[in-house]
Amino acid sequence: MTGDSWLATPISFWTALPTCRRFWISPWRIVPRQQAAGSWNPEPDRGSDAVASYRKPDERELRRRLSRIQYEVTQHEGTERPFDNEYHAEKRSGIYVDIVSGEPLFASVHKFDSGTGWPSFFQPLEPDHIVEKRDFRLFLPRTEVRCRYGDSDLGQVFPDGPAPTGLRYCVNSAALRFIPRDQLEETGYGQYLGLFDGESSS
């Protein structure tokens, strides 16, 4: 099965179960990478100062602006395939913002390789922009992570991360837009440049 057929046809529960047990993901909503992140740049680049006044577009507008994978992940709690997504191996310095609202969520200085195949962070960049919600749809309870203003589903957080927090925010690339360090000022996120003091350009 290839292409968008993954979006329309649920995979077998029992086929997906071993992977779901390993990564704690829903077996019903594994969706493929399809120009996951960066295919839509919110307009305008509003930066963090205007996030609080943000109004989420209606469903029709979201469908127009987002790719199918971005829409499925952020609006219907879909999950990308591990390792086959935009940012799991991203090593450049910068921040990650919500693909819908542009609110700043995570930073490269808090990113680590969890071995799961999804972007992982041990803490959020702006904790106030993160909403956590308990999820009991699978065998064990999980904590779902959403962004506050865009209300996008991002992924989950687990208590098995590295120091200093012991947390692992496991996030779908399709829910994110990466802004490299050298573009922070021009896109309205210049206040985060201090995170990268002492780092060489990358």
Image (cartoon, rainbow, N blue to C red):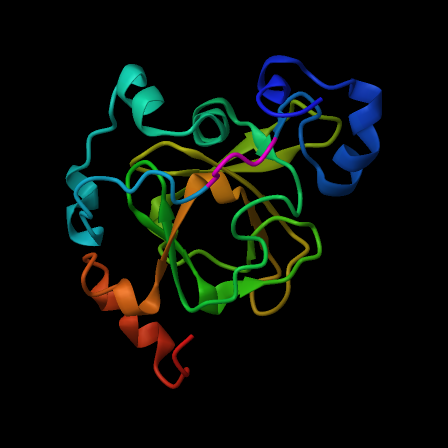
The picture places residue 45, in percent across and down from the top left corner, at 20, 48
Quadrant assignment for the N terminus: top right
- Does residue 166 appear in this view? yes
Q: State the image quarter where residue 165 is shown.
A: bottom right
Question: How many numbered circles are shown?
Answer: 0
- The residue nearer to you, when weighing 154 against 175, is 175
Please report the bounds of the magenta region as a residue range: 32-36
In the visual, does 37 lie left or right of 88? left
Residue at image x 53%, y 42%? 172
The picture places residue 96, in percent across and down from the top left corner, at 39, 54
- The residue nearer to you, when weighing 46 against 147, is 46
In the visual, does 13 lie left or right of 113? right
Dominant secondary-structure state across the stretch colored magenta: loop
> Which residue in the rendered view is the most extreme toward the bottom?
198
| Position above or below: 104 against 65 | below
In the visual, does 45 lie left or right of 73? left
- The residue nearer to you, when weighing 174 against 121, is 174
| Position above or below: 69 against 23 | above
24 drawn magenta: no
- Does residue 131 appear in this view? no
Residue at image x 42%, y 45%? 176
The picture places residue 32, in percent across and down from the top left corner, at 60, 32
Residue at image x 67%, y 20%? 28
The picture places residue 21, in percent across and down from the top left corner, at 79, 36
- The residue nearer to you, when weighing 85 against 2, is 2
In the visual, does 186 lie left or right of 58? left
Quadrant assignment for the C terminus: bottom left
| Position above or below: 82 against 66 | below
